[in-house]
Structures are given as C-alpha cells and as structure tokens.
Image (cartoon, rainbow, N blue to C red):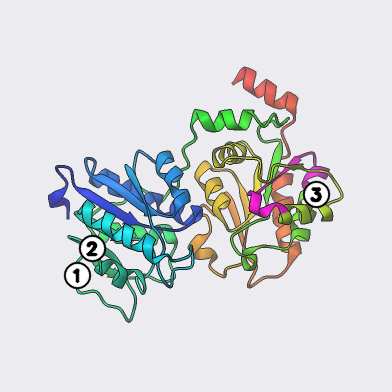
Amino acid sequence: MNSVSSGRFKIAVLRALQLGDLLCAVPAFRSLRAAYPYAEITLLGLGWAESFVKRFNIYLDRFIRFPGYPGLPEQPYSPEAWAKFVNIMNEEQFDLIIQMQGNGTIVNPMLHNIDINRLAGFYPDNGFVDSGLFIKYPEYIHEIERHLLLMQHLGIPSKGTHLEFPLIEADREDFKKLLMPLFPKSYVCVHAGSKGKARQWHPAYFAALADYCIERGFTVVLTGTSDEIDITKEVQKCMRHVPIDLTGKTSLGAVGVLIENAFLLISNCTGVSHIAAALETPSIVISLDGEPKRWGPLNTSLHTVIDWTKNHQFEKVFMEMVKLINDKPAMKQEQYEASYIYS
C-alpha cells in the first residue's frame, strides 16, 4: 500500500462512534498519518466528532458526517440523509476507505454499495471479504491493538500504543471561566455517567468513595454531560459531604484540563477514562461491560480497572482507592504554590 504514499492520496476512515471509541483509534490514526504524511485523511463520523477532527488535526484533515444506517444503534436512520451521504461519497472519489467501525457484519455490505476505489478493514467469521486489504476481525484483544493490527496488515508500522488528548489554549480559557478554587493534585474527579445504564456503577458506591476522598483532604469534583445531571444528583444525595458539581457546565476541553490536573479520576469505563489514560492521570475504572481487557487503560501501574461483572465486592474497589490515597496524599495549596515557585 505504501507505493501510493506520494501525492494527494485521499483516505477516508469510517468510525462513527463515541469519544472513547475514537480515542482508542488515535494510535492507528497516528500511524496512518506517519505512513502517509501528504495524504488527505477524512473521518466519517457522528456529528459530535467534527470537534474531534479539529482537536486531532495533526492526523485528520476533514470531517464528513455519517448519517446512520439500519442495524447501527448510534443514531436513527434516515433514507434521505443516507442518499445524500452516498452522493457525497461518490463525488469525493476516495482512493481508499478504511472500515474501522467494527467487525463488518453490517458496514461491509453497506460500503460495497458505494462507488469506492479501494476498501480496507475487518470482516467477521461468516463474512469473508476476498481482498488483500481485509483481515479477520481479531477478537479478545485491546481495541487499540486491534486497529494497529489492521494498520500493520496494510503495511503501516505502529507509532506506539499510547493515547493522546491535545489541550489547546481555548480549553484552558474554558476552564478558567469556571472560576473553580482548584489546585493541581488537590482534587479528585468523579464521573458517574456513561452511555447506557447497564454500564453505570451504582451512585451510592461513587458517593462512598467521594466522601472518603473529602475526609482525606481532597476536594471532589463531579463531572458529566447535561444528559447525566440526574446521575450526579443521585451521587450527591448519597454523600455526607458537599462536592463541587460541574455536571453539564464544562466543555470537553475544560474536562480535559480538569482531568490533567486531578490527583485521581474515578469513573465508569467511558470516554473520560481514556482521557485520563492519555493525560497520564491515575484512575480507578469500573468496567461493567465485561470487556476490561478490550477497553481498560493499558498502563496498569497507573490505572486500576475493576471488572464488576466478575467481582461485585465494593470493598475491593474501596481498598484500591485507599491504597492510592495513602501512598500519595493530597497536595495542599501552600505545597502547590511552593512547588510552582521553586520548580
């Protein structure tokens, strides 16, 4: 495939999924850009992901909104929107489309109905694709490594498994506008929300951990989207102490700044856990999807992932957090100021 790396090669990547899914694909995007530095790389994604492309503009050049398709649960299907998308794709005449949406059961037949020069990606057990640009969907490995295997199959060397979450000045300005009395490493972020109730740990458990953090001298900050306000309200109802509630009040960039400077993140296995992995902020991640080895942070010395589907012991989670806090207590304001002055 590298024989076409010169010139304005047009590549599109289909990954119309949520934040965590896209962050786990960043190592593949990084490798793709390194192999094709002059290519125009377009993400075919959900509407929210236009901002993701702007954040990762060193790897991605353009964005085209994917309208949805029957069988894909992320958004409703509209025949009119689909017809418009097909017209756009036919006009674009991409040299290559890389299917990184999933195992290909639904999207491979879908993409074959579009006028595409070359298509690469995954195929499922019962859906072999007779093309040297496809590989069988590798089960039971980490999501990061899965897409790097596809890159390797396409002749694209890996540029590492580490995640990224670039922070820009606008993100820091958004954070400053919150006017929060927070000092680096003196607070713990608690994120109790996640897409789908089945992936949400009980609010009372988050509350118990948050109360302990406050009793040990930390400020606790509750984060979440505006759709998760009810969840964080439940956490607060279960708490003995008063946290700072920023649910629905932050941009994604401000959340990134918040996590970057936090002592610890406590969350479900969702997008913010991947931000913490990218920014190397310690975390305790509760996995309720039964796939911690697929979605959990790779750095297990910095991040603790609890598979709640196999171990329903709150005490185990609690003791993991106690160990973290006892090993390195909260930094007081005066300590932060001193370290800032003399560093």
Give the amino acid at mark 1. Answer: Ser
Which residue position is annotated with label 3? 212
- Write down the region rendered in magenta: 212-229
| Placement of 113 over or under 305, stated as above or below | below
Asked if residue 218 lies in the magenta stretch, the reply is yes
What is the quadrant of the C terminus in the image?
top right
Q: Which of marks 1 and 3 is nearer the N terminus?
A: 1
What is the quadrant of the N terminus in the image?
bottom left
Q: How far apart are marks 1 and 3 (CA)?
A: 56 Å
| Front position in the image: 305 or 194 | 194
Percent x, y for residue 238? Answer: 83, 56
Which residue position is annotated with label 1? 131
Residue 300: quarter of image: bottom right
Which residue position is annotated with label 2? 119
Percent x, y for residue 302? Answer: 57, 49
| Front position in the image: 195 or 208 | 195
Dot 1: few (<14), some (14–19), or many (≥20) neighbours within 10 Å? few
Left or right of 267: which side holds 47? left
Element on which disc 2 rests: strand
Q: Determine whether label 2 and label 1 are within 8 Å by CB.
A: yes
Left or right of 111: which side holds 328? right
